[in-house]
Amino acid sequence: MVDIIEADASHEEVIQAKDEEIETEEVEISEEAEKPEEKSTDRQPTAKEFKAVDGARKAFEKENKRLKEELLANKSQPTDGDPMVSVALGKALADISLEEAESIVTYAKGKFNNLKPTPEQIIQASKDPWVMDAIKSQREKVAGENKTPTPSSPSSIIGGKTTEDVEKMDNKEFAKFVRGEKGGRSGI
């Protein structure tokens, strides 16, 4: 029920006016039944009825304004959930990239038919075998694309040693290697 505080009419006056209005309507209805030709549609409200209706209107507007402010205040406040749910969600998505997390949320939306899945639903979706396989497959694909391609020309192999092996040799080993290849002096 609406509290009427600072209104022109008290709650009791409004109820009394409505009761009187109902009584007058009943009398008019019974008179209309007897005299259908005397119907009057342009009846003006009495001062008392006008005050009662005006007071009720003001009270309604005041309560409506209060409820709107309360609703706006509730929307602006963040919802306090269980902090352990946030911790569990963080652990479930710890090694997940942002793109993968978006995929999990999208999957949860479809699986649970909910445009805003709860953290519990997201956690459950992240553990789904289909999602885990999709993430694994995507990671393998990206790893394959980022892998350094094999050189188009084979590395030069000299005397059974690659260029990397030759670069690792110290001066004495290199001199011995070159003498062995050329069969003579290396000039070093």
Image (spheres, rainbow, N blue to C red):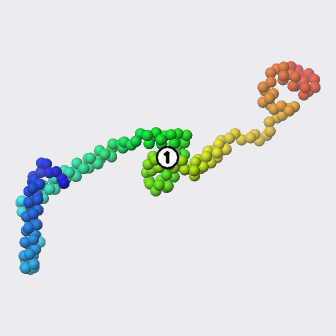
Taking the image as shown, residue 55 lies to the left or right of residue 130, namely left
Residue 156: % across, % down: 82, 35
Horizontal relation, residue 95 to residue 50: left or right: right
Q: Is residue 122 above or below residue 23?
A: above
Check the picture and name the quadrant holding the N terminus.
Answer: bottom left
Position of residue 5 measured from the top left corner of the image (x, y, whole percent): 13, 48
Residue underneath mark 1: 123
Asked whether 64 or 40 is in front, the reply is: 64
Q: Is residue 44 above or below residue 14?
A: below
113 sits left or right of 36 in the view: right
Compared with 169, 51 (above or below) is below
Residue in front for this viewpoint, 19 or 182: 19
Looking at the rendered structure, the number of numbered marks drawn on it comes to 1
Residue at 7%, 72% in the rendered image: 27
Image x and y of residue 123, in percent: 49, 46
| Residue 32 occupies quadrant | bottom left
Q: Residue at x 6, y 59 (%)?
A: 48
Q: Nearer the viewer, residue 155 or 27?
A: 27
Which residue shows up at 87% across the image and 25% down it?
Answer: 177
What kind of element bears circle 1? helix
State the residue at coordinates (68%, 41%): 147
Residue 125 screen position, x and y as percent: 51, 50
Mark 1 Cα-neighbour bin, 10 Å: few <14, some 14–19, many ≥20? many
Please name whichever residue, 161 or 19, is drawn nearer the observer in this view of the structure. Answer: 19
Residue 138 in view here? no
Q: Can I make out residue 113 in this image?
A: yes
Kind of residue indicated by mark 1: Ile
Image quadrant holding the C terminus, namely top right
